Amino acid sequence: MTSLPTQTIDQRLPDPDALAASLQRVLEQATAAGATSAGATMSISVGLSVTVRAGDVESVEFQRDRDLSLTAYRGQRSGSASSADWSEASLNEVVERALAISSHTGEDRYAGLPDAARQASDFPDLDLHHPWSLSVADAIDIALACEAAALAADPRVHQSEGATVSTHAGLTLLANTQGFVGHRLGTSHSLSCSVLAKSGDEMQRDYWYSSARRHEDLQAAADIGQLAGERAASRLGARSIATASMPVIYVPELARGLFGHLLAAISGGNLYRRASFLLDAVDTQVLAPGIRITQRPFLSRAAGSRSFDSEGVAMSDRTLVDEQGVLQGYLLGSYSARRLGLETTGNAGGPANVVIEPGKLDLDGLLAEMGDGLLVTELMGQGLNLVNGDYSRGASGFVVRNGAICEPVDEITVAGNLADMLKNIRAVGRDVDVRGNCRTGSVLIDGMTVAGQ
């Protein structure tokens, strides 16, 4: 352990062309062995994660993973196999197993590679790869500074649950027997802190974090720690409130999940299984007018940016919901599209950089617009029936009176029907959170049921 602080994570990755040649040989072997078509992926990732707690190093983790997976088709029958061993003998075994499995599976007329004409041929540089030459010693110092700032943020912050610094780099290649070869190269870095605040016998926990493709874009360690400490202390004294119907504001990191439910409801797998409250909803209103949702897969350095989906189909800028709140289309991969009698939208593996168009108000403006209501800052549990849209989540946050944040509340439930909630959105804030694949500001929703005492 004494040598760890001098070590630096090596985020160098193999040459994509060399890996592509290996991947092509696997596909050729599969074809020679009887596959009518095949697709394969190779991925390799390296990373470092350091966690400190109460001023001491709790863990130092180096990670280096790799995987090859092959899906081989015999007509409409398919078999898949994978391995982390890239030796010639192991890759031969992967081919044998995938074909053996395909001999025992039933025919599925929807299975197969995507339409060759839809495969990506343009691979723009999206500026996703920014390795961080981070030593363990430096990572420890950053995490300790973050934790110290959290503990100093308020005298009632008395205990740390840890601060973590992570850096990862990854390379993924995708190829198939239709001639497609593409790769993705990217990095992700993060810094987070979680602490406990105490007053008498009451304790409250909260956290904050930052993530980015470039480590230079991370929020400063002292700022993350201070926010984590202030958030935990602000929750002290929380009580439940009387059950009532009221407007509710979801902060951006929670609003992202709200729109995530909408995206799940228009995703092909749930649609062809008839497990969505938005069946046959294209060209119908699903959101309040003025709430526009787009997909922007080519944003520079964004978390979800990519030029092709997990099948190699070209991604594109799309309007998912227009300015009138009308749904323009679903999120489909090739399989789900065939099941629905439609064409793929290039969303095998999900959407990329969903952007909810921000409004003109910041959070203070939304609070003033709401007047009296509830600001939700944490949600617990799942609480969504995607089939009928019924929604109920445990929550905590703050009472709002005359546009001002007042006393903290917890042990409450926010409930409604998601179809109604989406149409009752009064405004989306301009306080956009760009840390994830869904970019949105705070969301003000009218007519929520808040159940408490």
Image (cartoon, rainbow, N blue to C red):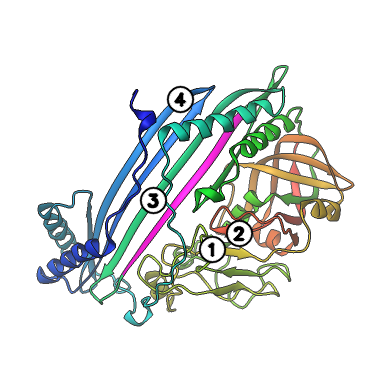
Kindly identify which residue carries mark 4.
Answer: 57
Q: Is residue 408 above or below residue 312?
A: above
| Amino acid under disc 2 | Arg
Q: Which residue shows up at 73% across the image and 70% down it? A: 290
In the image, taking residue 344 as reference, residue 198 lies left or right, namely: right
Q: Quadrant of the N terminus?
A: top left
Q: Label 3, label 4: how many angstroms apart (C-alpha)? A: 23 Å
Counting other residues with Cα less than 10 Å from the Cα at mark 1, is it few (<14), some (14-19), or many (20 or more)?
Answer: many
Q: In this view, does 349 lie above or below 3?
A: below
Kindly identify which residue carries mark 2.
Answer: 439
Kindly identify which residue carries mark 1.
Answer: 353
Nearer to us of marks 3 and 1 is: 3
Residue 265, position as x, y percentages in the image? 54, 63
SS at mark 4 in the image? strand
On residue 169, the disc is 3
Q: Give the range drawn in magenta.
A: 182-195
